Image (cartoon, helix red, strand yellow):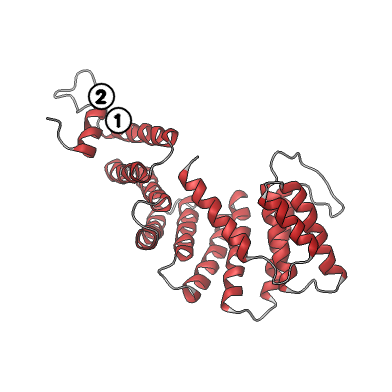
Amino acid sequence: MNKWLEYHEAVERRIMEMMRPDAPNPMYEQGWQDYTQGRYREAAGQLADSARIYEEAGAADGLNYARTLYALGELYLLWEGEDEFSDSDGVKSLSEKARKAYCDARDIYERHDLTDQQQIELSFLYDRIANHYRFEEKYADALSLHQKSREIRERVLGAEHAYTAESHHDIGNMYYALNDYDAALEWYFKAHAVNERVLGRAHPQTALDCGNIACTYKDKGDYATALKWKLLRYRLMLEYGEDPEDIELETKQMYDLYQKIYPRKWFQRPKPQPFNDWLYEQLFGQPD
């Protein structure tokens, strides 16, 4: 399995743990058991019942209800392979149900005076809603929410934290989507610097930062710098033991960049160094 995906899923599980209600009702606990065992459809049903319990008890403006809505949103997105459907609320898809849950939860959080921990929880909701804007190509709206998330994390957690770096990464992604490559690079470099210090050099997230930087330089037409960052990403992936299929894909992408820098033409003299020889030399030095 892809190491970055493993890391990302572990982070998402930690956030789900963080967002658990202070005193979960029995329906939430049953839904949580289903979630931990990968039964996302069943878990969503249990958490929907848990939310109704809060509503019937007149506790629908409390943070425990909002946290239940957050978990529901996550489960709707994890609930894969389902066709679009309609329900009594007129919501047409699981993605729409997730966004409604996130937005309702955000509105509740914003009506409360929040502790530092609760502000971090709100930052996760901003990011989830921003992701929906991104899928709709509303990049400016997504950027605004990611910036709100970053402001909270930098104030509460400080600059040297992985969640703050994640916000830098998200902001970079939005500038990239807006074709503002210089701004994207500024934020990608910030994310890389923090992740290298906090998570370590040979870490999947640090390697992903290198890939983002490489991709942005490539789209700027600076293939040589893009190749430099691709090679760094490749080294890190080898170091932490990335999945062989991902290593193969990375090799192909480096080859494509190398070809843009040194196009092979039959009449060219001297001929450029073959890619495999170049890569071996970069990794191991000059062959004997």
Q: Quick check: 144 above or below 207?
A: below
Q: Residues within 10 Å of mark 2 (few under 14, many from 20)?
A: some
From the top left corner, tell me how far across and down residue 236 is, in percent: 34, 46
Which sits earlier in the primary sequence, circle 2 or circle 1?
1
Q: Residue 283's mark? A: none
Q: What's under tag 1, amino acid-wise?
A: Gln
Q: Residue at x 73, y 58 (%)?
A: 100
SS at mark 1? helix
Q: Nearer the viewer, residue 206 or 143?
A: 206
Q: What's under tag 2, amino acid-wise?
A: Arg
Task: Identify residue for label 2.
Answer: 264
Q: Residue at x 26, y 35 (%)?
A: 261
Q: Nearer the viewer, residue 186 or 196?
A: 196
SS at mark 2? loop
Q: Nearer the viewer, residue 95 or 260?
A: 95
Q: Residue at x 49, y 64 (%)?
A: 163
Task: Identify residue for label 1.
Answer: 259
Q: Count the marks: how many?
A: 2
Please say if the residues under marks 2 and 1 sit with CB atoms less than 8 Å apart. Answer: yes
From the top left corner, tell me how far across and down residue 56 is, in percent: 88, 69
